[in-house]
Image: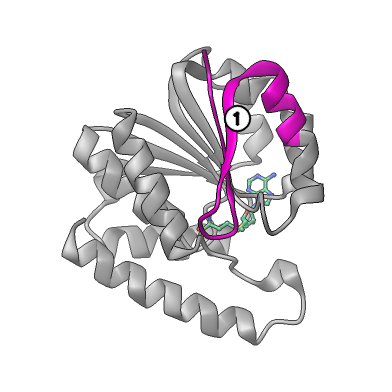
Amino acid sequence: MDEVVLAVLDRVTEAAARHDAAQEDRLDRWRVLEPDAGRFVWFLAQAVGARNIVEIGTSRGVSTLWLADAARATGGRVLSFDTDPAAQEDAARTVAEAGLSDHVEMRLEDGGAGLAALDDGTVDLLFLDAERTEYPSWWPHPVRVLRAGGVLVADNALSHPKEIAPLHDLLVRDLTAVTTIPVGKGELVARKP
Ligand SMILES: C[S@@+](CC[C@H](N)C(=O)[O-])C[C@H]1O[C@@H](n2cnc3c(N)ncnc32)[C@H](O)[C@@H]1O
């Protein structure tokens, strides 16, 4: 793991903890990926040789940094969607500070619409970290865009099991090796056969 990226990750993760502790409304919190979950997706992206990585839910770019550092190692890139312009502008500055801008494209767009516009079988790793209850409404695109052997990862499987349950059921129906990795807030993973 690149030292510059790790230093930026530490700074943003700490800033997010301070920011979130002061917010009453859940939607005002940055809710960034936990460090152990970040390290897990960083490893997984490289293990599957992910060159085309799609993320829904940029926020301040913490998961983007983990994924982009992996993409630099694989020669790939991260396409990251969010609907909050201030968050994405902040994330773009953070990604630049980490020296990873060449490996990230930010799109200010609804994640469901963004997925619907992607070609079949083109995504190696899809990371879902937006509003969990919306994911089923995006079907069949999360599965359609994955290549054979590609993986889907969704955060919050252990912190919000009831909200994640409809996604879990769709993954069991349409993908294989569906399981929850107990890191961070719980990473629900599945592989396209
Ligand atoms: C939990 S935060 C993402 C945290 C981020 N992955 C990180 O580790 O720093 C959720 C983000 O999803 C975004 N979001 C919510 N609904 C969305 C949608 N339909 N499409 C794209 N982004 C969405 C929110 O604006 C928010 O920034």
Q: Which residues are magenta?
A: 167-193
Q: Is residue 174 magenta?
A: yes
190 over 122 or under it: above or below: below
Front residue of 63/80: it is 63
Q: Residues within 10 Å of mark 1 (few under 14, many from 20)?
A: many
Q: Quadrant of the N terminus?
A: bottom left
User: Please, which colouring scheme is shown?
Assistant: one colour
Amino acid found under the numbered disc labelled 1: Val
Residue 22, x across and y down, in percent: 65, 87
Q: Secondary structure at mark 1?
A: strand
Residue at image coords 39%, 58%: 92
Q: Decide if ligand 1 comes within 8 Å of the CB at mark 1.
A: no
- Image side of residue 67 versus residue 121, left or right: left
Residue at image coords 69%, 24%: 172
Residue 23, x across and y down, in percent: 69, 82
Quarter location, residue 8: bottom left
List the residue tagged with mark 1: 178
Residue at image coords 17%, 65%: 3
Quarter location, residue 149: top left
Quarter location, residue 39: bottom left
Q: Is residue 184 magenta?
A: yes
Residue 129, x across and y down, in percent: 60, 49
- Image side of residue 54 versus residue 72, left or right: right
Residue at image coords 36%, 77%: 11
Residue 34, x across and y down, in percent: 49, 63
Front residue of 100/20: it is 20
- Image side of residue 173 versus residue 67, left or right: right
